[in-house]
Amino acid sequence: MHNQPRLLLHTCCATCGSWIPDELSMKYQVDLFYFNPNIHPEAEYYRRLGEIKKVSDILNLKVIEFPFDPQPWFQAVKGFEHEPEGGARCPICFEHRLRATADYAKAHGYDAFATTLTSGRQKKAEIINPIGEKLSQEYGIEFLCRDFKKHGGSDHSMFCSDDYGVVRQNYCGCVFSKKASLGQTLQNNSQSLPHVQ
Ligand code: SF4
């Protein structure tokens, strides 16, 4: 329907992006915005984009994408490299991505912007939504303030991504979260090894 308001939906991965745009399409004309320069390495950046395209093809949604260019993101989080996931680096990462979304939405005549980020179990809506609202004020464009993990949203993401045949990832996205996830896996494996004297 072309008389629906236009929504630019920042989408971090196909797991989050599977049911949310479908639901929002009842009220909005949704375009997906893949701006995630935090994702490391390059192959993983394009793998996640490929999974999003798989879902967008099924839902008949447009994906706005960008070439892999992580340097501005590394600049933004400089000094916070040793923070754990959920620490002080993450709000900077959220704002970096949402600022690009708000900026693009405003420049291209969208009525509102939103993000799928709040569907992640580790992602706190009380941190993400105030960032969106701040940018909404700054850019003069509505931010759709939602917590997509509520009402079973996180589980729904898992079910829907399975339905769409989406391959999920085992770390948040950045090189620091990848290293932490790898370290955790190695630690778990060493704990399960038999003790040799
Ligand atoms: S852990 Fe996730 S949210 Fe935090 S900085 Fe890394 S990619 Fe961004």
Image (spheres, rainbow, N blue to C red):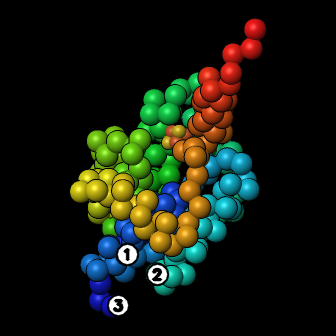
Q: Is the residue marked 1 within 8 Å of ligand 1, measured from its CB?
A: no
Residue 86 visible somewhere in the drawing? yes
N-term mark: 1 or 2: 1
Amino acid residing under circle 2: Leu
SS at mark 2 in the image = helix
In this figure, which residue is indicated by the disc labeled 3? 2
Q: Amino acid at mark 1?
A: Asp
Label 1 – label 2 distance at C-alpha: 7 Å
The residue beneath circle 1 is: 22
Residue at position x 50%, y 33% in the image: 85
- Residue type at mark 3: give it: His
* Nearer to us: label 1 or label 3: 1
Can you say whether 26 is above or below 143 in the image?
Answer: below
Q: Judging from the image, what secondary structure is the residue with disc 1 in?
A: helix
Q: Residue at x 39, y 69 (%)?
A: 19
Most foreground residue, 62 or 154: 154
Q: Is residue 84 left or right of residue 48?
A: left
**At 62% from the left edge and 27% from the top edge, which residue is drawn?**
192
Is 141 rendered above or below residue 135?
A: below
Whether tag 1 and tag 2 are in contact, CB under 8 A, the answer is yes
Q: Nearer the viewer, residue 27 or 166?
A: 166
Structural crowding at the residue carrying mark 3, measured as other residues with C-alpha within 10 Å and reported as few (<14), some (14–19) or many (≥20): few
In depth, the one of 93 and 186 nearer the eye is 186
Quarter holding the C terminus is top right
Residue, disc 2: 59
Q: Secondary structure at mark 3?
A: loop
Which of the marked residues, 3 or 2, is nearer the chain's N terminus?
A: 3
Label 1 to label 3, Cα distance in Å?
16 Å
